[in-house]
Image (spheres, helix red, strand yellow):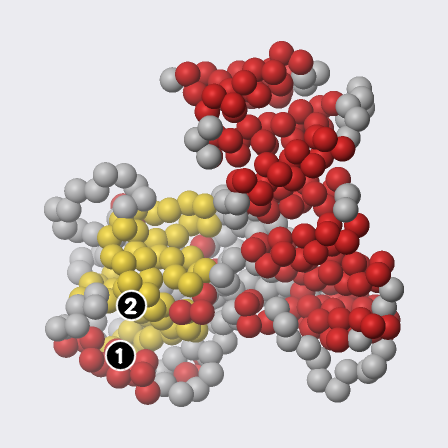
């Protein structure tokens, strides 16, 4: 097994200082290292500040910027103090990219991701500050802050022995472990639970705590009306969306829409979630649900044209270029929006090219 050691800056938790602040992207630090152990839709995206944004120094030739330098790799994150390097956490089974990667955020939620390393959040481990006491003797070459080795490297046994014998807690949050958590000694009153959960969600932006209250309310759903159950599902979907758990959020928004059949704003959100999670066929189904339900008027024509554009984008992702082009030409010729017309024209030109 290959392993790679990255030197990073020291932060307490390597997630936003207030993980529940839905606007932290604009208000908190812009240093991507701060988010190295944040669960972002079941993955952690690690950033290391590297010379020329490149990991490798070898003569390997890569076809494109998405090439992976290492796969199924053990990644160790260390910080320097008094000329010693201390382990603060690690990723298992990680992919290390040759070039810095960028992934755009979900619209209005989350943050743009800049990363060199990617691993499933369940394979990522962040030590509490008091347990970041194990130091390793690693020599980083020149001014590069990474070190690459394999199982024959003398450091390998030293590092893996520490990892395998560490039996204390970790402080990074894995959202999939939180989705069904409930509060202890809960009152047998779903109305109070829902009300308290709503306060955590909308007033305090404490989405994990809100999630527990909504989960607990659902334990007593035989006391709730259909509309109240739908409200809890919707609130739970919102919590998960703000926690960047988009796959899970989508499931609960669909639970809502399955109960009420139609709500254009919820369906629009579902479409964006489907696109972001690359379920393009499902996104098209929901686009059609809106297009087949709404009667086109002067007031909503541009909005419906935007839905058609989303459908065309999905068709392009699915490599159905002819149908996408036909749809874009129709929008371009009929839309009341100059911006949409120009957008369609640009995409059509790209398809031709």
Do the numbered discs 1 and 2 sit on residues whose CB atoms are within 8 Å? yes
Residue positioned 80% across, 71% down in the render: 221
In the rendered image, which quarter is residue 133 located in? Answer: bottom left
| Badge 1 density bin: few <14, some 14–19, many ≥20, Cα 10 Å | few
Q: CA distance from mark 1 to mark 2?
A: 9 Å
182 above or below 318? below
Residue positioned 75% across, 87% down in the render: 185
Residue positioned 27% across, 39% down in the render: 64
In the shown orientation, is residue 44 left or right of residue 301? left
Residue positioned 29% across, 73% down in the render: 85
**Quadrant, the N terminus:** bottom left
In the shown orientation, is residue 228 left or right of residue 282? right
Q: Earlier in the sequence, mark 1 or mark 2?
A: 2
Of 124 and 112, the residue lying toward us: 124
Please give the residue where the numbered disc 2 appears in the rendered image.
74
| Residue 48: percent from left, percent from top | 35, 57
Q: Quick one: SS at disc 2?
A: strand
170 above or below 336? below
**Quadrant, the C terminus:** top left
In the shown orientation, is residue 53 left or right of residue 330? left
138 above or below 115? below
Of 276 and 141, the residue lying toward us: 276
| Residue 19: percent from left, percent from top | 59, 64
In the shown orientation, is residue 225 left or right of residue 28? right
Q: Quick one: SS at disc 1?
A: helix
Please give the residue where the numbered disc 1 appears in the rendered image.
160
């Amino acid at each position: 097994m290959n392993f790679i050691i990255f030197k990073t800056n020291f932060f307490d938790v390597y997630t936003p200082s207030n993980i529940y602040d839905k606007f932290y992207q604009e208000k908190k630090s812009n240093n991507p290292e701060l988010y190295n152990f944040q669960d972002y839709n079941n993955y952690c995206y690690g950033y290391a500040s590297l010379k020329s944004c490149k990991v490798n120094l070898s003569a390997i030739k890569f076809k494109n910027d998405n090439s992976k330098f290492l796969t199924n790799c053990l990644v160790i994150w260390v910080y320097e103090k008094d000329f010693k390097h201390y382990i603060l956490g690690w990723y298992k089974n990680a992919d290390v990219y040759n070039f810095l990667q960028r992934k755009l955020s979900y619209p209005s939620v989350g943050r743009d991701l800049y990363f060199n390393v990617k691993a499933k959040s369940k394979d990522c481990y962040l030590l509490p500050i008091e347990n970041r006491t194990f130091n390793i003797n690693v020599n980083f070459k020149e001014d590069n802050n990474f070190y690459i080795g394999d199982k024959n490297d003398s450091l390998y046994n030293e590092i893996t022995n520490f990892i395998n014998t560490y039996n204390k807690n970790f402080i990074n949050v894995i959202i999939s472990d939180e989705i069904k958590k409930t509060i202890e000694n809960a009152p047998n009153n779903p109305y109070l639970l829902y009300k308290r959960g709503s306060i955590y969600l909308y007033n305090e932006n404490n989405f994990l705590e809100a999630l527990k209250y909504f989960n607990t309310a659902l334990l007593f759903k035989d006391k709730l009306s259909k509309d109240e159950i739908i409200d809890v599902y919707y609130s739970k979907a919102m919590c998960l969306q703000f926690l960047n758990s988009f796959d899970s959020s989508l499931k609960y928004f669909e639970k809502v829409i399955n109960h009420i059949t139609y709500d254009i704003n919820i369906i629009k959100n579902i479409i964006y979630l489907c696109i972001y999670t690359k379920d393009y066929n499902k996104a098209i189904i929901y686009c059609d649900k809106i297009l087949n339900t709404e009667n086109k008027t002067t007031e909503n024509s541009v909005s419906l044209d935007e839905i058609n554009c989303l459908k065309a984008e999905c068709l392009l992702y699915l490599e159905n270029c002819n149908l996408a082009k036909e749809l874009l030409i129709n929008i371009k010729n009929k839309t009341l929006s100059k911006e949409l017309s120009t957008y369609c024209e640009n995409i059509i030109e790209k398809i031709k090219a």
